[in-house]
Amino acid sequence: MKKLKGGVLRTNKGFSILDILIVILLAAVIAALVTPKLKKDKENENRTEAREKMMVIAAALDEYFLTANGTFDIESFNAFRDSVILNNIKIAPEDTLRPARFYTDDFANLSNFLPEGFENSSPPNGKNFMIFSKDSSYYVIYDPNGYGTVLNGKPLWME
């Protein structure tokens, strides 16, 4: 208990306004220090997820190309080629098995080559990855959020 002017007694129960303001100020300073770190961690997480998804799409594009758009069975071709070589069979050039191979920029064509439930969206805003392809020459996968680019299966970003 304190004795105040005029002989009135007062107890020291509760917090003063100054105590509350100091606590609020400390909480604000801590929040200001922690928030940028949390944003940076979330940005790194989004970048990593987007880059992993682009590499999955690149693998699907490569598989699409190798299997001639899903119509060419590599194992059957290898067995055919081995039987031709082993049996010394002569094949005329027009009989040569040459599938038309090209890349696609239509994401729907890749559905058979992607994991089930795969989403063609970049975090955090869900914008779709962009695929550009030129026949059998090359393909480019671009992230709309600027997290990176993949050219013919090779990432074009620095770690």
Image (cartoon, grey):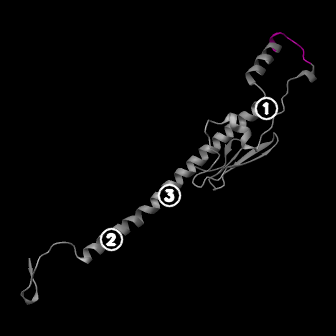
Q: Amino acid at mark 3?
A: Lys
Instruction: Name the quadrant containing residue 153.
Output: top right
| Span of residues in magenta | 85-91
**In the rendering, at what x and y percent does residue 123 appear?**
58, 52
Task: Identify the disc placed on residue 134.
Answer: none
- Residue marked by disc 3: 40
Q: CA distance from mark 2 to mark 3?
A: 25 Å
How packed mark 2 is, by other alpha carbons closer than 10 Å (few <14, some 14-19, many 20 or more), is: few
> Residue 50 or 153: which is nearer the viewer?
50
Q: On the rendered structure, is 24 left or right of 56?
A: left
**In the rendering, at what x and y percent does residue 58 appear?**
68, 40
Residue that appears at 84% across and 32% down: 100
Q: CA distance from mark 2 to mark 1?
A: 65 Å
Secondary structure under tag 2 reads helix
Q: On the rendered structure, is 104 left or right of 50?
A: right
Q: Amino acid at mark 2?
A: Ile
Q: Amino acid at mark 1?
A: Ala
Secondary structure under tag 1 reads loop
Above or below — where is 28 with respect to 110?
below
Disc 2 + disc 3, Cβ < 8 Å: no
Of the 4 image quadrants, the one containing the N terminus is bottom left
- Residue marked by disc 1: 68
**In the rendering, at what x and y percent does residue 135 appear?**
82, 41
Q: On the rendered structure, is 140 left or right of 46?
A: right
Residue 20 magenta-drawn?
Answer: no
Secondary structure under tag 3 reads helix
Comes first in the chain, label 2 or label 3? 2
Comes first in the chain, label 2 or label 1? 2
> Residue 12 or 73: which is nearer the viewer?
12
- Residue marked by disc 2: 24
Above or below — where is 12 with respect to 79?
below
Residue that appears at 83% across and 9% down: 87
